[in-house]
Image (cartoon, rainbow, N blue to C red):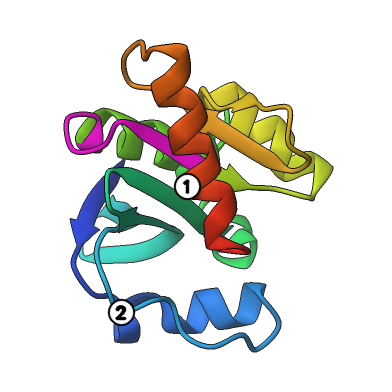
Amino acid sequence: MSLIFQIFDNVDVLAAGLFQRKFGGAPPPPDWPHHICGFWQQPGSLSLLSYVHFGRFEDICLVGGMCTDGDLIRSLPDAARAALRQYPSIAQASLEYGFETLKDRFDAFFGLVENPRALEVDLAAGFVETEHRHLVRYLPRPLSDDRLQALTAKALGVGPF
């Protein structure tokens, strides 16, 4: 039994149900890379537990759509749920996997977060709050102040993501 992560270029069929259920019938996830899915693997089965999109926008990454399948987690056998407790949260582990896997592809990662619980998870995963309401960022390496300001302005210019 283990939690494994995989990056996909497109997950329309794979994660659409979870995404739409968690976001109230929203359209399916974006159709461009990078989609990170967390799976619970046990003998004979592989179950989708989490989804998050790490979307390229030039030299930054826009992170959004994080969701986990709480119903599925609650339905797992006791031993599986006990094994999952080694992670602070599946959402945090998903974000950390994305940062580690994609750190060489982007100068900065940005997220928009309004939900207090989501903010707590984002901060635990390595995001930091910015001076802009709801905008958080993760830097895989130090940047000059000018570069950081330019990338932040770029993220803000995208609008809701």
The quarter in which the C terminus is drawn is: bottom right
Secondary structure beneath label 1: helix
- What amino acid type should be assigned to the residue bearing mark 2? Asp
Foreground of the two, 109 or 148:
148
Magenta segment, which residues? 102-110
Residue 66 image position (x, y, % from top left)? 54, 56
Residue occupying the point 66% across, 75% down: 23
Local packing at callout 2 (Cα closer than 10 Å; few below 14, some 14-19, many 20+) is: few
Asked which quadrant contains residue 136, the reply is top right
Residue 122 image position (x, y, % from top left)? 60, 34
| Mark 2, residue position | 31
The quarter in which the N terminus is drawn is: top left
Measured Cα–Cα span from mark 2 to mark 1: 21 Å
Residue occupying the point 56% across, 59% down: 67
Query: From the viewer's perspective, is 105 left or right of 138?
Result: left
The mark nearer the N terminus, 2 or 1, is 2
| Mark 1, residue position | 154
Query: From the viewer's perspective, is 2 left or right of 150?
Result: left
